Image: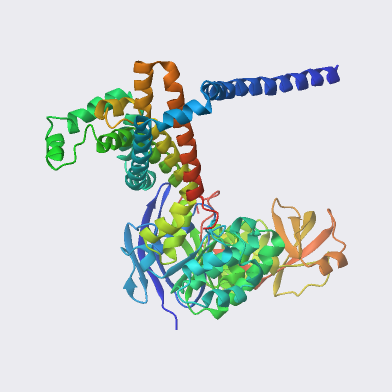
Amino acid sequence: MGLTLDLSGLTKAHGEFDLGPIDLTVDEGVLAVLGPSGSGKTTLLSVIAGTATPDAGAVRLGGRNLVGRPPEARRVGMVFQEGALFPHMTARENVEYAASADGRVEEFATMLELDDVLDRRPPTLSGGERRRVALARTLAADPDVLLLDEPLSSLDAPIRRRLRDELHDLFASLDVPILYVTHDQRTATALGDRLAILRDGALEQVGPPEAVIRRPASRFVARFTGTENLFDGRIVDRTDDGVQVQCDLGLLQSGVSTGQPSAVTVCVHPSRVEVQARDAAGEPGTANAVSGTVARYLNVGNEYRVDVAVDGRSATLSTAVRPTTFERLEIDAGTELDVQIPRSAIHLIPEPPVETRNPPGEH
Amino acid sequence: MTRNAASVRRRLSLDWLSVALVLGGLLLVYYLAPLFSLFVSASPGEVLGRLADPGVRSAATTSLVSASITTVLATVFGLPLAYWLARAETRWTTPVLAAVVLPLVLPPTVGGVVLLTVVGPNTFIGDAATAAGLPLTRSLAGVVLAQTFVASPFVVVTAKAAFEGVDRTLERASRSLGKSRWTTARRVTLPLAAPGILAGVTLAFGRAIGEFGATMMLSYYPRTMPVEIWVSFVSLGLDRAYPVAILLVAIAVVALLILHTVASNPWD
């Protein structure tokens, strides 16, 4: 049974902004810390690993405070960006250097499919092989916590995807708390059992990936997790089964019924809407229909992103369209479409729109 | 028109390369020509003849032994200081580095004078050492003191740069793997800095075996090779100094070759 990593009131001055205070508990399982470059992700890991000293707060592992202990006395394993392999040692020597017991080298080499490259030096290894060796080295030290600092950065897409899938399986087999830091939303949601969004040194939102993506707590989280559709809105009516909100898309019926302030941000995730041919029969009552024309479309790999300019308004609605639908509707620039926005797809952020914030008393 | 301009430009850039080659080549000739002319100025017989001279033999021995001891001392005392200079995050590193560089910019004779004020006759340390049977002037110890003062900064300055060249992330990685600061320095930092350190050690040895100014002041006896060359030159003339100079060059080159073979042991 793994120990619990518990961060409480952790702060660290950090040039442009201060990290924290961070309060976070990581049990067995993966917490993916997602944030843009310079949001304090690496600083957070350094404080846990002991290569940086926090200004205040505690880092507890299984109840004992690690602050003040040197890095080597923490049993905190860290996988660095680019691997940080010792270039004067072979892959095997790198892993042996860390191994707590004999025989572990072979064990991890086999687990990470490294048998063929063990006697090579890091400069001759590919990017993917280097990450595997780094992972094997860290695991060989038998850590009580595993920290990973963007281990998939600057890898080619196919290798990154493959390694990401392997990491997913590997993490499931480990029973230690894992903190995985990245600025890539796809990696974070694929690997994280929970997602923590870091912005300017502060935790903006923590929760299961689905919850964070479907119900972002702020415009920042929404944008950073892939929701580009953010519209300034105003609640005009509240009923038992939801609220009516007026925004750039028109008057929308949402399923949200919690007490929101009247000025909100309307958030529509591109993958939760349905595009249809113009005037196709919708499902009246359950969804909002918005008419528009295709402003542009991009093939983004597994799907198309189709931007629809809403008729008679300045708003553009981004939608994610499956290739089959894309071909069936013969989508091209200028195609006229209807977009069905299910009530459940509408999320309201109680953040007053910054751009159009009205002075108090004008309502 | 454009082709003409391009070819002019190409000829011009070629000319720049030629100029650079000529400049560098001239400097190289300036290094090697005197050495060559030195080696043809005395026959091998003369050189070997001078080697039979007990005075020269003793000078060669003194130079080799003292320069070796100096190199070891400079390395043992210099590496920790270099590591501290490279890794400490304090503003004290700047004045400390200035103190380290001081012997490099001080004229060696002045260095000798400075040392004499501390370890010379009629100083507290000098007298105490003499009383203890280890005189610090006119002795091998004096030679080593003079050489260490002048040569050890090469180890510190060069090794500092070598340590700074080691990615600190590697040290962090080592410690996160449960290795102490000492183990990390020994097994990660030191091996990675080794080529740079070796360059510094080589420079220090070369500087030590050629040291003349400070050595003259501290220990005219036992004579080192540079002092012997000086004495031959002054008392017997330039012709008698050539063979000793050739011997010194040969000893220095062989010693440096051995040092490199040992330090970059291919069977390690």
Q: Look at the picture and state if B187 lies above or below B73.
A: below
Residue at the (39%, 61%) spot, across then down: B183
Residue ID at (54%, 60%): A89
Would residue A97 be visible to someone looking at this image?
Answer: yes
Q: Nearer the viewer, residue A52 or A269?
A: A52
Snapshot colouring: rainbow
- The image quarter containing residue B9 is top right
Q: Is residue A200 visible?
A: no
User: As drawn, is A18 to the left or to the right of A208?
Assistant: left
Could you tell whether A208 is left or right of B198 in the image? right
Quarter of the image where the N terminus of chain B is located: top right
* Position of residue A325 measured from the top left corner of the image (x, y, whole percent): 82, 68
Q: Is residue B140 above or below residue A157?
A: above
Residue A13, position as x, y percentages in the image: 37, 52
Q: Nearer the viewer, residue B163 or A55?
A: B163
Q: Looking at the image, how many numbered discs can be counted on the residues?
A: 0
A195 to B11, vertically: above or below: below
Residue B13 spot, x, y in % from top left? 72, 22
Q: Is residue A118 left or right of residue A42?
A: right
Apparent side of residue B166 relative to residue B82 in the rendered image (left or right):
right
Q: Name the residue furthest bottom.
A: A1
Residue B247 occupies quadrant:
top left
The x, y position of residue B213, in whole percent, is 32, 25
Q: Nearer the viewer, residue A262 or A29?
A: A29
The residue drawn where x is 62% and y is 60% is A246
